[in-house]
Amino acid sequence: MQRTLKSPVEYRGIGLHSGKEIRIIVRPAEAGTGVSFVRTDIEEHPVVRAQGANMKARQRRTCIQDGRAEVYTCEHLLAAMYALGIDNALVEIDGEEVPGLDGSSLEFFRALRDSGIVETRSPRQVYSVKHPIYVREGAASIVALPGTGKLTIEYHLDYSPKSGSSPGAKQLVAFELSAENFERDIAPARTFVFEHEVEALRAAGLGKGATAQNTLVVGPDGPQANTLRWDDELARHKILDLIGDLANAGVDLDAHIIATRSGHGLNMALVQRIQEEREREQEQGEAPTHTGLDIRQILKLLPHRYPFLLIDRVLELDGFQRAIAIKNVTINEPFFQGHWPEQPIMPGVLQLEAMAQLAGVLLLRKLENTGKLAVLWSIDKVKLRGAVVPGDQLRIEVETIRAKPQVGHVRARCKVGGRLVAEAELKFTLVDA
């Protein structure tokens, strides 16, 4: 079952890169809402969800961004949540960077654990890797292989003398992830930097909050032995970062991962490849859809009927936060008879209608909305990016931006074969049927 916190947890500290004093409060959240960050220092308090689609490439840190709001250096906090099996949490943060604390994940982990963890009645999203998933950049690589029911990670650290480390800077560590193993063997590992990189990072405006207490400095002869918590602390910290980045996949992973010289950029590429593979398996009917809906269940929620019902099957419902559905487009669709019959293309307005119908499914599942209708109120930020033709399978994705008793606001996308063909933001008013 999905899990959340029993009570809020507060942290204060300096950002490793920004050097700013930051306060965060981690609060319990409803099942299916995932882990989200609320920027309390920005007007209207924008929300950034920790998910692969929001991951952005940034130097030396993990960043998630949604519109004008971003949060970075969140990997140590996310790793602690993943290790504890916390699926849902709301993180209020009054700046752009999560505090660095001692440069590890240990304080995050222990405070979250001590707050108490509670289970909900909703099942967790689990993804088992069935075929090798491989990403590579130069000499760095990560491969995710089928697992044995757990997440196991093997990290090969190998820095040449050119990077400022000693010729023998090679470390190999491997762990099966559990809360106990994480606290004992991974969480205390601190972030590190090579001595020759320090000036370049400072020139780029990074590392303003780094100190000898929260960052290991690796010189030509390696880090000072008396400062290390383990001889292989660098490789352990790389595993810590990788777990925090994998948390953005939003699933409980069953996989064996082998990483070599990888960092945040390649970790992000792996998360996105995992999501692509999940989508492919869902579309081909290979992935289990325990939280989906068949056509009979859809008909109970929506008032639409042929020829205007534009959802064939709901593949996944993530609480009240996210939904994924498919529409199989065939030449027998009634609109093809009059819409460019010689070159049949699905009207963009009907793609918008399919998004709206899936949003209705998501919003009307809430108990307080039983017996109501979701009436489309406004459509904004519409982009029609590609043609949809007979033989295509339209994948529709909807994510809640805001849900109130009388109003719903969602972000929606349509894809064909992984290619984005349409997107929009939709607002609804909920009225009595």
Image (cartoon, rainbow, N blue to C red):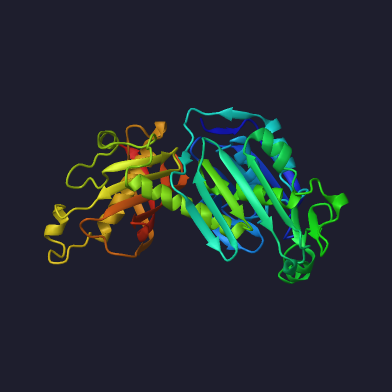
Residue drawn at 15 percent across, 65 percent down: 340
Closest to the observer, 8 or 183: 183
Residue 141 against residue 314 in the figure, above or below: below
Query: Position of 339 compared to 104: left or right?
Result: left
Is residue 74 in view from this perspective? no
Residue drawn at 50 percent across, 55 percent down: 134
Residue drawn at 70 percent across, 43 percent down: 186
Q: Position of residue 37 (x, y in %)?
A: 59, 48
Is residue 163 in view from this perspective? yes
- Residue at the front extreme of this rendering: 168
Q: Position of residue 233 (x, y in %)?
A: 75, 49
Residue drawn at 79 percent across, 46 percent down: 230
Considering the image in quadrants, where does the C terminus appear? top left
Closest to the observer, 326 or 265: 265
Residue 350 against residue 179 in the figure, above or below: below
Query: Position of 382 compared to 64: left or right?
Result: left
Q: Position of residue 413 (x, y in %)?
A: 38, 55
